[in-house]
Image (spheres, helix red, strand yellow):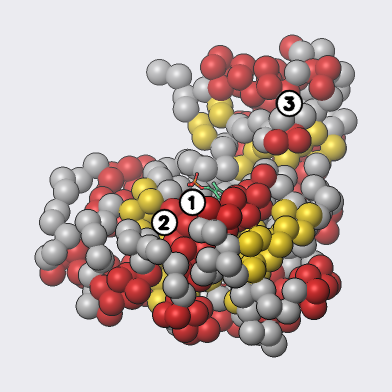
Amino acid sequence: MKRNLLLTPGPSKVPVELCEVLGKPIIHHRTPQFQLVLKEVAEGLRKVIGTSSDVYLLASSGTGAMEAAVANLVSPGEKAITFEYGKFGERWASLIKAYKATPIVCKVAWGGAVTVDDVKKALMENPDAKAVFLTHCETSTAVAPDLAAIGAYMKTTKAVLVVDGVSALGTEPLKMDDWGVDVYCSGSHKGLMLPPGVGIVAVSIKAIAMIDISTNVRFYFDLRKAKKALAETDTPFTPAIGIVIALNEAVKMLLAEGLDKKQEYYLKMAKAVWAAAEAIGLKVYAQPAFRSRALTAILIPEALNPKKIVKTMRDVHGITMAGGQGELDGKIVRIAHMGAVDEYDVLTGLSCLEKVLKESGHKFELGASLAAAQKVFNG
Ligand SMILES: *Cc1c(COP(=O)(O)O)cnc(C)c1O
């Protein structure tokens, strides 16, 4: 059977232990058994996110968690600031518009990321903005801003800081309460190593106060309902039962290994991939100061046909990486090193990339990327 290695930034590889949990017969959600799961998973996620506040689980993909944030925080006619440094940043502005509020869109050149000075400037120019929306790991460009610095400033303002952490959670360091993040949105299918189906929204006390006075229409994604249910260790609607049960196990695995240790390991995998790319004459797309731990975007000369490279790796060799989106369409290959991906997955992916690059006519010494990566892993 052909291998099916997912080195994509969502869904990502699901480890065997979790496949086994996912394969179990379903249980009913209004039972003491499931309540225990809900209680444990909430506690575990609080540790992963770094908050003592509420964490809501929605039956949705990551975008559902983002929609919940917008629908509950920003009322029609209000202003909210968004930062765009890739494709996912644009989603915040689209959501804000869909809910009849006004996005103030601040563009940052792709390859870089928002800085605390950018946030200060935007809020000074728009003191009436209710919220700042940004992306923790911008998956389309593989960058991550200094969220701690931005959050520290946001703590001194009235506006709330809302973060798309769909691809970052578990992989990028995060201390929501200490850093001053008010709403953190994520999903089950990236750093948390599961299939899609659970949207995650963590909310600070400051955000809860705003949710209570928002005048927006909302029903399924009404976080007031989620809050009430959570207090009773329940969910307002049928949850994605099987994935929630597996999420509980995934979070336990992550915490048992140690969050800090795991996140150091993701950084090591990232550094290995950066070194690997350079060793075969390719450039890493993201500016060095903003490179994420969760994935790497490698620039591929257009003459080598990056789209075809991705397709060949997937269809012929069973190794799936991602191509580019938006202005990077047909220009990059993205390798995820998040969740359950380990160094041998990365080395397998790199050896496949070498093979296909060679076939496409790229000139380099075979094995050079593997040697460079191995040096990082074993250095
Ligand atoms: C994957 C991703 C999303 C969207 O998640 P869906 O689950 O496809 O809705 C949003 N933001 C970022 C940064 C992502 O990586």
Give the tally of numbered discs: 3
Place of residue 279 in the rendered image (x, y in percent of width and height, measured from the top left):
84, 35
Label 3 within 8 A of ligand 1 by Cβ: no
Amino acid under disc 1: Thr
Mark number for residue 330? Answer: 3
Element class at badge 1? helix
Which residue was labeled with disc 2?
199
Q: CA distance from mark 1 to mark 3?
A: 24 Å
Mark number for residue 313? Answer: none
CB atoms at circles 1 and 2 under 8 Å apart?
yes
Place of residue 315 in the rendered image (x, y in percent of width and height, measured from the top left):
54, 17
Q: Is residue 46 above or below residue 2?
A: below
Label 1 within 8 A of ligand 1 by Cβ: yes
The residue at the point 67 percent across, 17 percent down is 308
Q: Residue furthest bottom?
A: 156
Local crowd at mark 1 within 10 Å, few (<14), some, or many (≥20)?
many
The residue at the point 82 percent across, 13 percent down is 361
Q: Is residue 177 visible?
A: yes
Decide which of 8, 227 is in the foreground and name it. 227
Q: Quarter of the image for the N terminus: give it.
A: top left
Decide which of 287, 282 is in the foreground and name it. 287
